[in-house]
Amino acid sequence: MIEIRYIKDTGEITGLCEDVEQFGHLDRKRDTEAITILDTPIPDKPIYAFLLNAKKNILEVNPNYVELSKPVDLAAELAELKAKLIAAKLIT
């Protein structure tokens, strides 16, 4: 179970509580937002990856969410490329 705070008009999630013992502690002073409890597992992605479908009371994928790619280790890639070029005798 999770407790979420969301923008009523868009379903955008602005707060999340995963601890049942702490339910009821999300800030409730925003007129444009509401709070609900969902009987769903804790999401494995950031809250920005989801929207609340208030009519069905379920989380849906946020089509505007862009997942960041993993950082690239450029030094390792260059070392690997250099090793391939040396093996192909293209450089010394």
Image: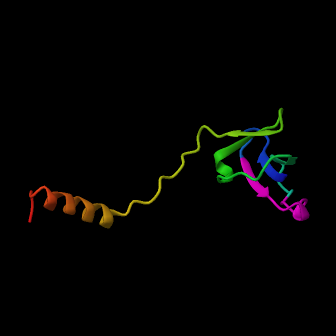
Say whether residue 18 is magenta. Answer: yes
In the image shown, does 52 or 74 lie closer to the viewer? Answer: 74
In this picture, residue 75 sits left or right of residue 4: left
Q: Residue at x 51, y 52 (%)?
A: 68
In this picture, residue 44 sits left or right of residue 70: right
The residue sitting at the front extreme is: 87
Q: Which residues are magenta?
A: 13-27
In this picture, residue 30 sits left or right of residue 86: right
Say whether residue 81 is magenta. Answer: no
Q: Residue at x 82, y 53 (%)?
A: 2
The residue sitting at the top extreme is: 55
| Residue 82 location, quadrant | bottom left
Where is residue 75 shown, x and y percent of the image? 30, 67
Where is residue 35 shown, x and y percent of the image? 85, 49
Q: Residue at x 84, y 49 (%)?
A: 31
Q: Residue at x 84, y 53 (%)?
A: 3
| Residue 87 location, quadrant | bottom left
The C terminus sits in image quarter: bottom left
Residue 40 against residue 25 in the figure, above or below: above
Residue 13 against residue 83 in the figure, above or below: above
Where is residue 10 shown, x and y percent of the image? 72, 39
In this picture, residue 18 sits left or right of residue 12: right
Q: How is the image coloured?
A: rainbow
Where is residue 51 shown, x and y percent of the image? 71, 42
In the image shown, does 31 or 56 lie closer to the viewer? Answer: 56
Residue 10 against residue 25 in the figure, above or below: above
Count of picture labels: 0
